[in-house]
Amino acid sequence: MELYGAAKTVIAPITRGIWPLHTEGLHHIPAEGPVILAANHLSNIDPLFIGVAVPRPVTFIAKRELFAEGNIAQRTFTRALRAIGQLSVDRRPGQGSQEAMEHSLKVLAEGAAFGIFPEGSRSPDGRLYRGQTGLAWLALTSGAPVVPLALAGTNRILPRGRRVPRLCRVGIRVGPPVDLSPWAGEAGRARSRRAATDAIMAAIQRLSGQPQVARYAASVKAELRAGGA
């Protein structure tokens, strides 16, 4: 992670200078050993602020489309993602889930911090949507603690239709690890995965204060696109 440290040395001061960052509860994140950071998802730039705020390196899985090699800007962005240890995953049906889980387990087996957005997609309206149960499977299979994290303000920086980023404050609140002991050893049970995921989402909601929606963000966004068409 030497490149991660070098990249953060450059990126963090610039990011904090443009968007003042207020953090709470960072002490809940263990200084070493495997840990899953589960966060709400408001913007594509959420990983940037988590990476800047969290003292230790955090690996996220990014959709493969972000690792483009077309023009100079795309290649530069791709190099930056890879320099800070981000992994690409194929999100086509039947491809992404298995690949993502294998990558995630490997990251945790190496004792690293892994960041995940349980909603699976950015919130279309600022509310907190239902979590995908792959998070619980990962936590119960690996045994890594799950630390909830809530972002605020990132959705105001570059809202839909805006090309120039806004200058605004960003907040990150971190809570204590979620107790998943009631479902220990039950990664293979769908009901246990659902219950454990709901417990994690409830912890995120307590930090963020967002209204919760009992639907998946991807489904709602698909309906909105269909309606717009």
Image (spheres, rainbow, N blue to C red):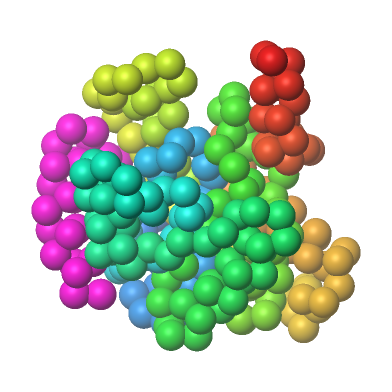
Using residue 9 as the reference point, say whether residue 122 is left or right of it: right
Q: Nearer the viewer, residue 91 or 176?
A: 91
Q: How many numbered badges does the structure rendering display?
A: 0
Instruction: From the top left corner, tell me how far across and down residue 186 is, in percent.
Output: 81, 78
Q: Is residue 19 magenta?
A: yes
Instruction: From the top left corner, tell me how far across and down residue 82 is, in percent.
Output: 31, 63
User: Residue at position x 29%, y 30% from top?
Assistant: 169
User: Residue at position x 19%, y 58% from top?
Assistant: 8
Which image quarter holds the N terminus?
Answer: bottom left
Task: In the rendered view, tell whether residue 15 sits above or below residue 144.
Answer: above
Residue 202 makes an appearance in the image: yes
User: Residue at position x 28%, y 24% from top?
Assistant: 165
User: Residue at position x 41%, y 48% from top?
Assistant: 66
Q: Quadrant of residue 166?
A: top left
Q: Nearer the viewer, residue 20 or 177?
A: 20
Q: Which residues are magenta?
A: 1-23
Residue 53 makes an appearance in the image: no
Instruction: From the top left corner, tell me how far across and down residue 222 is, in percent.
Output: 71, 30
Q: Quadrant of residue 43?
A: top left
Which image quarter holds the C terminus?
Answer: top right
Q: Nearer the viewer, residue 203 or 140?
A: 140
